[in-house]
Each structure stands twice: as structure tokens, then as C-alpha cells.
Amino acid sequence: MAPRKIIIDTDPGQDDALAILLALGSPELEVLGITCVAGNVPLPLTIRNARLVCELAGRADMKIFAGCERPMVRDLVTAEAVHGETGLDGPNWDKPTMPVQEVHAVDWLVETLMAAEDGEITLCPVGPITNVAMAMVREPRIVGKIAEIVTMGGGFFVGGNTTPVAEFNVYVDPHAAAVMYRSGVPITTMPLDVTHKALMSPAWIESVREIGGEVGAKTAAMVSFYERYDLDRYGSRGGPLHDPATIAYLLRPELYGGKDVFVEVETQSELTMGMTVVDYWDRFGRPPNCRWISEVDSDGFFELIRERLANLPAGR
Ligand code: RIB
Ligand code: CA
């Protein structure tokens, strides 16, 4: 069976890094390119970080594109408190050497999708949805070309992680998320409702370190740094790895459970800005516009990540 063609749109971020590594370690997927967006840290750093992660995976050939440096309407909000000043704190990194493509990410998304067969490419946005929404605005015909969007963002039953009701990716660019949910593209959402059910354990982090080489050492250092925020904030027994859930879903959908629902995004009220309002019990009678994932086999998720990280060249 031919690998599934995907594009990862990302704001690395340590959890984004694990999503990229999981995808690059999985032969079932063909990553056509990585489009960077401002989010966890400003765009120049998300680009740097995407380059570092691809080089770590032995994929200096990967096409990396610079995208939007700010949300569609609101000012950029970043998350250095979570990810560190560089967005990829934890390991000691050299300077990246692989190139960044000349064409803007939004233009490349449009060109690539318009040149593809209908339903050939799946988008995996794991940061603010700015690039994807801007591509839809620039060329509405791409909506009919996209096979599926599998995105990390939002939260409903567990509330938000940035405000009491808003998750970071949707809070940063609520207008972009609203464009996506109104687009009609088949969407599968991995919200906090499911990512908070798969928390890292010290034993798992150690099993990653034991993979050895640069991949083992740097990945363990990334997630050890990254989880401290959630341990402090939630007093939880481990940190959630949000973004790899999108890739794990593509690889092993049987690990997950969810429901087709109607979702709308708050873009008016400052109090609830960026809230994903999920009509879980169909009170509005509106046709579902996404599959909202809320259940996960946590052990299966973490074993899949470890197994695929071990597929990568261990590096120096
Ligand atoms: O709320 C979690 C999301 O926000 C993740 O994608 C994380 O990388 C940050 O972008
Ligand atoms: Ca992210």
C-alpha cells in the first residue's frame, strides 16, 4: 500500500518535534513538506526548530517552508513559559544547516494541493491554524482537494490550557480555526479532552533515552524539559504529549475513540475567545463538522512513539 501523503503544519515546540519525529519514523506516511507558523515561539524560531528536528531525524532533505508570522486578526501570543525561550529547550543544539524553501508556506500549500488529485493529501496542523486558513482564503478550491485535516487543538470537557475555556492553538488564532471548522473539509480533532488522557511517565522517558544516539538523548531531554510545566500547573503525574496524537491517529486509528459533532469557535467575546464550543449532545441540530476524539489507549500511544523513534537513524 502506498504511503499516505501528509503535510505537517507546525510551531515547534517539543511536542511538535515528537509529532515530526513520529511521522518521519513511520514508513506508512510520506511527509511532503513541513510548513512553519508562529505560535509557541515567533516564526524565525519555529523555522529553526523544524530544521533542527529534521536534521535530528536524518532528514536534511525535507522541504521546510516559512509561513505566517502572526495570526489572521489578533496579535501573536507565544508560549515560552512552556517551551523555553527557543521553543525547543532541553537539549544542547548546534546551529541548523539545512535550507528553508524560498516559496511562502501558504503559496506552497495552495500550489501543492491544486496540483494533487482530489483527496490525495492529508493536512496535520499542530499549531495555530493560520497557514491553513490563509491558504483556504487565498484559494477556496483547495477545500475540495484536501483528503482530511487531522489537527491538535481545542478542548471542551476539560476546558482550556491558555484561558479557562481556550486551548493555545485555537486561542492564538481563533479566526483561523473558525475558517477551518466552517470549510467543509473532513476534520478529525485531537483536543485536550484526549491529549490529557495520555501522560508521559518517567519509565517511558527512560525507554526513549535508551534508544540511544542523538535521537534518544535529545528526545528525552526535550520531553523532560517540556513536561515540567504541566507537572507544576496541573500537579499531574506526567506531561501530555499533544501533537503526536495527530500522527498516531493516522498510523493506528484503533487507539482512539470519538464522536462526530458540530463545533464552532468563539471569535467575539474576550471572556471566551478561542473556545471550541462543541455541540456534543446535538442541541443545535447542525450537521457535524468534525470527529472529536476523546478516548485513547495511552500505553499503545506511547509504545508506538518509542517504537518509531527507534526506527530513525540514531545519529552521531
Ligand atoms: O495546547 C497545546 C498545543 O499548543 C500544542 O500544539 C503545543 O505545541 C502548542 O502549540
Ligand atoms: Ca504545536
Image: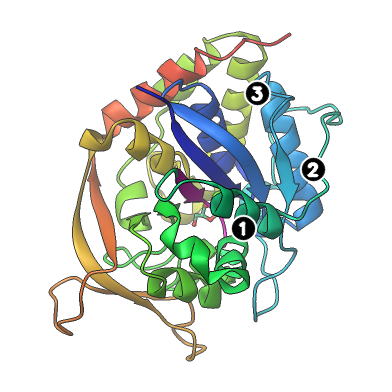
| Residue 315 higher or lower than 131, as above or below | above
Instruction: Considering the whole magenta stretch, tell me its main secondary structure.
Output: strand
- For disc 3, the neighbor class at 10 Å (few under 14, some 14 to 19, many from 20) is many
Q: Which mark is residue 110?
A: 1
Left or right placement of residue 250 versus residue 295 in this view:
right
Scheme of image coloration:
rainbow
Query: Which element is circle 2 on?
Result: loop
* Residue at image coords 71%, 55%: 41
The amino acid type, in three-letter code, at marker 1 is Val
**Pointer 1 with pointer 3, Cβ within 8 A:** no
Q: Position of residue 128 (x, y in %)?
A: 57, 62
136 vs 201: above or below: below
x then y, percent, for residue 44: 81, 52
The residue that mark 2 highlights is 101
* Residue positioned 48% across, 48% down in the render: 124
Indicate the secondary structure of the residue bearing disc 1. helix
Q: Which residues are magenta?
A: 121-128
Residue type for callout 2: Gln
Image quadrant in which you'd find residue 246: top left
Q: Position of residue 95 (x, y in %)?
A: 87, 31
Farthest bottom residue in view: 269
Query: What residue type is disc 3 on?
Result: Lys
Label 1 and label 2: CA atoms lie apart by 15 Å
Which of pointers 1 and 2 lies earlier in the amino acid sequence? 2
Q: Which residue is mark 3?
A: 218
Sequence-wise, the earlier of marks 3 and 2 is 2
Q: Residues within 10 Å of mark 1 (few under 14, many from 20)?
A: many
Disc 3, SS:
helix
Q: Is residue 269 visible?
A: yes
